[in-house]
Image (tube, rainbow, N blue to C red):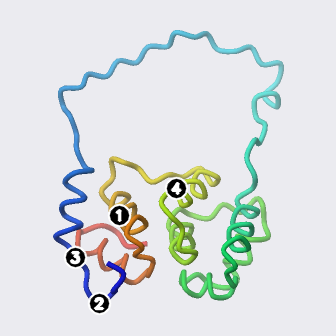
C-alpha cells in the first residue's frame, strides 16, 4: 500500500467493515458508585501530569532523526504555524494539523495516539474518518495527499 499511485479501496472496505461495528443489543447504564473527592482547591485537582505537546513533538523529531523543515513541509503546515506549535506552550493546534504532522513523521498508530492524547485528542474507534486514518498509519500510508484522497473517496472531510 506504500505506492501512492495505487489505492486498494477493497482492502480499506474490508478493514472498515471489520472495525466499524455497532452492537444495538448492548444496553448502557450509567451508575456513579463513588462519591466526589473533596479537593481543598481546584489546583490540587488540576496538575499537569504529562509532558507538553511541544516537548513531545521535539523529542519525536529528534528520536527519529528528522529535519524539522522537512516535517512541516511534508505535513503541508506553514512555517509560522509550525513555529507557533513548537514554541508557544499555550497554543493548542487542531487535530487535523497534528494528524498531518504525525503522517509527516511516519508515526505508528500507537505513537500517533500518544501524541494526540497529549493534546487532548484521540483516534476514535467509532468514527469512520478516524478508522481510515488508523488504517493509513497501520499500513504505512504517510503521504498527506494520498490520505486525503482516501478520506474523500469515502465521503469524509480531508485533513
Point out which mark residue 5 bears: 2
Decide which of tag 1 and tag 3 comes sooner along the chain: 3
Q: Quadrant of residue 10?
A: bottom left
**Number of callouts in the render?**
4
- Coordinates of residue 151 in the picture (x, y in percent): 31, 71
Q: CA distance from mark 4 to mark 1?
A: 12 Å
Q: What residue lies at 20% left-to-right and 73% top-to-bottom? A: 9
Residue 27 in the figure: left or right of residue 37: left
At label 2, counting other C-alpha atoms closer than 10 Å, the crowd grade (few under 14, some 14-19, many 20 or more) is few
Position of 106 relative to 71 (above/below): above
The residue indicated by pointer 3 is: 8
The residue indicated by pointer 4 is: 110
Decide which of tag 2 and tag 1 comes sooner along the chain: 2
At label 3, counting other C-alpha atoms closer than 10 Å, the crowd grade (few under 14, some 14-19, many 20 or more) is few
Decide which of tag 3 and tag 4 comes sooner along the chain: 3
For label 4, the SS is: helix
Point out which mark residue 135 bears: 1
- Coordinates of residue 123 in the picture (x, y in percent): 45, 54
Amino acid at each position: 500500500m506504500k505506492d501512492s499511485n495505487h489505492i486498494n479501496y477493497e482492502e480499506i472496505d474490508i478493514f472498515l467493515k471489520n472495525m466499524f461495528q455497532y452492537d444495538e443489543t448492548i444496553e448502557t447504564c450509567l451508575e456513579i458508585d463513588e462519591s466526589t473527592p473533596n479537593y481543598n482547591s481546584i489546583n490540587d485537582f488540576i496538575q499537569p501530569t504529562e509532558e507538553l505537546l511541544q516537548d513531545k513533538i521535539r523529542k519525536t523529531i529528534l528520536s527519529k532523526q528528522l529535519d524539522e523543515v522537512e516535517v512541516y513541509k511534508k505535513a503541508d503546515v506553514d512555517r509560522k504555524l509550525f513555529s507557533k506549535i513548537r514554541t508557544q506552550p499555550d497554543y493548542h493546534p487542531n487535530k487535523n494539523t497534528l494528524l498531518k504532522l504525525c503522517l509527516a513523521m511516519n508515526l505508528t498508530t500507537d505513537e500517533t495516539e500518544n501524541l494526540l492524547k497529549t493534546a487532548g485528542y484521540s483516534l476514535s474507534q467509532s468514527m469512520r474518518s478516524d478508522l481510515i486514518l488508523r488504517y493509513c498509519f497501520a499500513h504505512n500510508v504517510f503521504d498527506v495527499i494520498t490520505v486525503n484522497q482516501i478520506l474523500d473517496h469515502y465521503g469524509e472531510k480531508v485533513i
